[in-house]
Amino acid sequence: MPESETHRAEYDLHLHSYWSHDSTIAPEAYFRWADRLGLKCIAITDHDVFDAGPELEALTAKYPHIRSPRSVEMLVRTSVGMVDLLCYGLPDPIPADLAPVLKEQHERLAAKSSRLAAGLTAMGYAPAEFVVKPDNVVAVQGQSLRNATKFGAALVAKGLFATVEEYTAVMDEAAQRGKELMGKMSFPRPTAESFIPVIKATGALLVLAHPHGSLVRDAERRPEHLRGNEVAMLDILREELQLDGLECCNGPGLPQECVDRHRAYCVKHGLVSTAGRDCHGGKPDMSNEQVIEKNLGWHLGANEWLDEFVARLPCREPEAAAV
């Protein structure tokens, strides 16, 4: 039996906080549980934004024994379709060259939220009642309305809905009404050609997120001539994205053979191997605290991968935070 089936790893390099459009977890909750559970390194990899920067700076000062490189997960357009790219070790503040990319993502989130708000208003609801993000997030990102089960769970807990299913039905109708009122919207995503030179210039470590899910499980989304040829797609992405690593394990449910295959690819090509739980929180039958306690660091990644990862990070954390 693999060690990681019975032991929690010393790190978790794929976590989402309430700064992500689809998460409700406070960043401090991860640090508190990492401290309690003995993890040495965590990475908050929020989707497409770096708004957590000031909060994470305070938390790394409060928990100096827990390394936490500044990170983001970006959805990037490539020649083989959309992929998620984990970017580790970003400088803070974010360089000016990255500002336009992040501005586009803020505008995309605001537009989608506005369309839902319009639909809810047309149905006689007050959109503000559907906001589940804390005030500090709303001040930066706006209402951040979204049709997501974890948001429904939060609103059920507040007593606005009896069940998550009831919430989902309302939001489905609001989305349709919003489209009718505001029309179809185009939400651009950064291309590899435009994004990679800018992000590489920061010195960040670039890791392909959950390759098993994006390249194998979602193979029908890839060019027909590459379907079923994972190595060919990895070779293309390794060059196109200038990859430094693969997320060889994303959660505990992957077959060991899959983890081993991706690890072997990393060893062959001099890439780092990472692992994370991809935690978002917010389940109907579990609080965020329970979700973190159950999931943080619980994956099939080997502990020695952490040393390889840290050795390749840009030297931006203070020595006191070293693993």
Image (cartoon, rainbow, N blue to C red):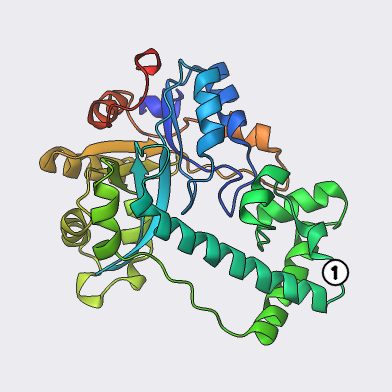
Labels in figure, total: 1
Q: Is residue 191 left or right of residue 92?
A: left
Q: Which residue is mark 1?
A: 125
- Residue in the picture at 22% in, 59% down: 230
Question: Looking at the image, which is closer to me, 7 or 9?
Answer: 9
- Residue in the picture at 28% in, 40% down: 205
- Residue in the picture at 24% in, 45% down: 262
Quadrant (top left/top right/bottom left/bottom right) for the N terminus: top left
State whether residue 158 is above or below residue 320. below
Q: Residue 226 lies in what quarter of the image? A: bottom left
Residue 312: image x %, image y %? 23, 31
Q: Is residue 240 left or right of residue 303?
A: left
Disc 1 residue crowd, few under 14, some 14–19, many 20+, Cα 10 Å = some
Question: Looking at the image, which is closer to me, 164 or 65?
Answer: 65
Residue 10: image x %, image y %? 41, 22
Q: Which residue sits furthest left? A: 268
Q: Is residue 214 left or right of residue 144?
A: left
Residue 280: image x %, image y %? 57, 45
Q: Amino acid at mark 1?
A: Tyr
Q: Residue 181 lies in what quarter of the image? A: bottom right
Q: Which residue sits furthest top? A: 320
Q: Which residue sits furthest front? A: 96
Quadrant (top left/top right/bottom left/bottom right) for the C terminus: top left
Give SS at disc 1. loop
State whether residue 215 is above or below residue 133. below
- Residue in the picture at 61% in, 85% down: 183
